[in-house]
Structure formats: structure tokens, C-alpha cells
Amino acid sequence: MTRRTKIVATIGPACDELESLERLIRAGADVVRLNLSHGAIDEHLVRLDRVRAVAAEVGRPVAVLADLPGPKIRAGQFPDGGVQLTAGGYVHLRSGAGLSDAGTIWVEYETLVEDLAVGDRVILGDGAISMRVTSNDGARAEAIIETGGRTQGRPGVHLSSERLRLTTPTDQDLVLAEQVAAAGVEFVAVSFVRAAADVTKVREVVGDRAELVAKIETSSALANLTEILEVSDAIMVARGDLGIDCPLEDVPHLQKSIVRQCVEYGIPVITATQMLESMVIAPSPTRAEVTDVANAIFDGTDALMLSGETAIGHDPALTVATMSVIAERAEREAHYRQWAARLGRVQRERWDSMGDRITAALTHAASEAAHDVDAVAILCCTSSGRTAKAMARFRPGPRLIALSPNRKTVNALSLTWGVESLDVAIYSTTDEMVWFAVETAVQQGCIAQGDTVVVLAGSLTRSAATAADVLRIVQVQ
């Protein structure tokens, strides 16, 4: 494995059959995303089974991420063929399930008018059409169209997240979370997160059956990011809605800030939305998209996500392969060694419990030791995956290999930067654990005789709360 940054690919009509799924995974998809906003749950569970079958056939771990829909506000149906909303014109916004037209847009949100204030921005669809509220008489709001365009069907309506009374997760989200957790997905993504409590509600349903990904797409989530990180297993920078709820020009800076904080916390982070959007219909990306992907890697993201590009795109496997090539090239320019040196200072400020401090100290030491002895690999013996995630914060140059007796952990580490994960048995002593970790890595062709490796493991006499407290440097015989 030469690429260290992981790829999340959304499956849909363009790639959900066995043959096309196999091409997608062979092209380099590490995590498969099920977008529960589209399609029935039974369809997604069939896709889950197909992913498992293909991953077993290909012979590599693949994680599955189920993305909850979250609260959705939609406009009333527009006429067949749609309508043109012209910049500079005015429309009325009303609450209800009426039929929308160029003069009045009905919105299926009970307190719409009550929640809108003069000056508020209202967005239709993916952000192409924007309006600004100019008056509100309590029965309807009037808005000037700032950016016009044609709209049709029942487009989504986006209001300021700070004014919305809708809560997340919805009742439907909780039902879906239970179903996908029971089916065995590795990750459940929580949409429209505004506070840590939103993630905790899903945790109460899912338990430890799946890891939770908090989608950062609102200004409220940004304000509460530290608390959200404390209760989440991974983060998604959902740039689509984030660019609607926040000024568009802020998005690149927010992305960098979120990614940096996630890496410091040792929490995997996904950068998402429109990364190779032109490849929905084209065989190659734009130059701007290539630069966007590379910059996300320079930021330090663990994973890059493809949405419509693979779900409904022209050639899903080609899109994944293209992203993989861009990532490999960008990684050759990334200054990870400087980053590791900075994290050595940051960790003392961010990690509070004794178990966390021991893990932070050992992974920092392992990063330095691997550099000093010119190790070819760092082996992390881990049950939960926590040791490997902590080690990945340093973006080490040597191969980062996680060995776990837990198949779910092996799959889930497909989201973490640089980690190659292998199955091992459960051993009764630390010496056995270290020996068999090295032996397994040799058998899998990851390391060879004469190589020097760094091995991290947890002492079997310590509390399970401590991820790792044993570090050894081994020369492979």
C-alpha cells in the first residue's frame, strides 16, 4: 500500500451491483458509504451484504459507513418543468404543503415564518439559488432573490441553523441507526450535529456496535466543536451545508481548522463534498478539483469522500483510481515530520486522563524511535483500534500496521490515515503478542528479515482503559 490517505466512496445506482462494486474496491475504495437519505433501508442492507461479499473476495478490509438523513426541510412541489427564479425579483415564503410557483414558495416547516427575521438568508437546493428576507408580517415572509436559477421538484430549503427548531437526530434517524448497527456497519454518521448531545442520543441507541461520525455542517457545531470531539469517534467536514450555513469564503479556513484539531485529538477526519464533482459526467477532473484534493491532504485529512461522483457518476471506479493517484502524488510533498514534532507539544495540552497521557507519550516516543532507528514499520497491537489512531496522529513515514483480534476493528481502521490492518489471534502474554505481531507482518509481506520495526502493545496486567504502555524495537530475524 503506497497511498496513506483513505478514500470513502458512496455507493448508489452506478456501482451497487457486485461487478461494479468489485471494480470500485479494487480501484482503492477503503470505506463504502450508504447514503440513507436516498432509498429504502432494505435496499441499503442488501448493499451492505454485497460489500461484505466483495471485500472477502478481494481480500482486503473495507469499512461501511451509514449516513443518517437528519432533519430535512423541503419546498412544496414546483410545476412540471420547474420555474425560473430571477435575481432581483421577489417571492413570498409561506409555511405549509401547498404547490410552489415563481411567486410563492411553500415550505413544509411549521414555524417557518415565525423563525425568519429580516436579513436572514434562505437557500434552495444545493446553494445555487439564494434569497434574503426583506419583510415579515407574521403570515408570510417576503424575500428578494439574490442568486437566481431554475428550480423544480421539491428542493431542500436551508435556513440558519441557529434559528431552526428541528432537532437531530430525528425519530427516523434513531430507527435507522438501530437497524444499521444491528446489521453490523462500522460507522454511523450523524447529520446536522449542533451539540455533543446530538451525538450522545445516537450513542444511546447504537452503543458500542458502531463508531459515530459527527458531521460538521452548521455554525453551531463549529462553536461546540471541542465538546463534539469528546463524544465522537470520527468527524466529517461536510462542506456542502457548511458553505450554506457559514460564509462561503470561510469554508477553506474552517476546513483547515477542523482537520488540525481532529488530528491533535487522534480522531479520524473525512473531508467531503464536491471533491471531484465534474467526474459525475466527465472522465477527468478539473485542475481546481485536483488542487482541492491535494490541499485537503496537505491539511492532514485522514480520508477524502466521494458522493455523487461514485453513486451516480459516469465511471465510479475511474473516479476512485483518479483520486488515489492525486493522493499519492500529494503525499510525496506533505511535511509530516514537522507535523509530528508539533504534536509532541500539543499532546501535553490536549490529553487529560492518565491512560490518555500514557498512550500519547508512548506513541510520541514510537514516532521518534522509528525515525531514529530508520524503522520500516510501526506495528500497533490493538483491540479497539485506539493505539493505531493515536499513532496515526504523527503521520509516521514508516508503514503503520495495526494488528487486532477484533474483525470490526480491522475494518474500521480503514478510515484512519496510513493504517494497514491485519487479523491476529488473542494471546496470553505481551511477549506472545509482540512475537506474533512481527510474525504475522512477515507472513503478509509487510516486513522482511533484517528489517527493524517498532512494536506498540498494551500490557496485559494493566487496565483496559490504557491503550498502549509497551514499546519495543525489534530486528526481524
Image (tube, rainbow, N blue to C red):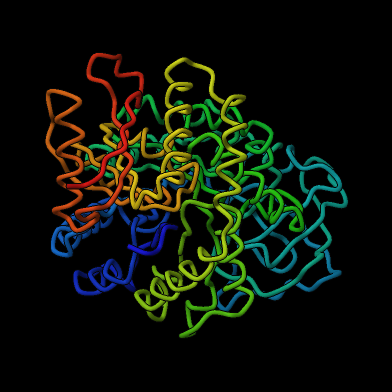
Q: Is residue 169 above or below residue 280?
A: above
**Residue 414 in the image, given as x and y percentages of width and height:** 33, 51
User: Relative to the observer, which residue lies in front, 122 or 258?
Assistant: 258
- The percent position of residue 356, horizontal first and vertical second, equals 46, 22
Which residue is at a point 66% across and 60% down the rendered structure image?
124
Left or right position of 354 against 100: left
Quick one: quadrant of the N terminus?
A: bottom left
Q: Nearer the viewer, residue 425 or 290?
A: 425
Q: How many marks?
A: 0
Residue 172 percent across, percent down from the top left: 40, 39
Above or below 445: residue 389: above
Work out which residue is located at the far bottom of the displayed protein and give it. 283
Which residue sits at x=34%, y=52%? 376
Left or right relative to 362: residue 296: right
Q: Is residue 306 left or right of residue 251?
A: left
Give percent across and percent down for residue 62. Answer: 27, 54
Dividing the picture into quarters, in which one does residue 410 lie? top left
Q: Nearer the viewer, residue 436 or 33?
A: 436
When the figure is inspected, residue 273 is found, relative to residue 135, above or below; the finding is below
**In this orientation, which residue lies closer to the viewer: 184 or 324?**
324
At x 27%, y 52%, the residue is 451
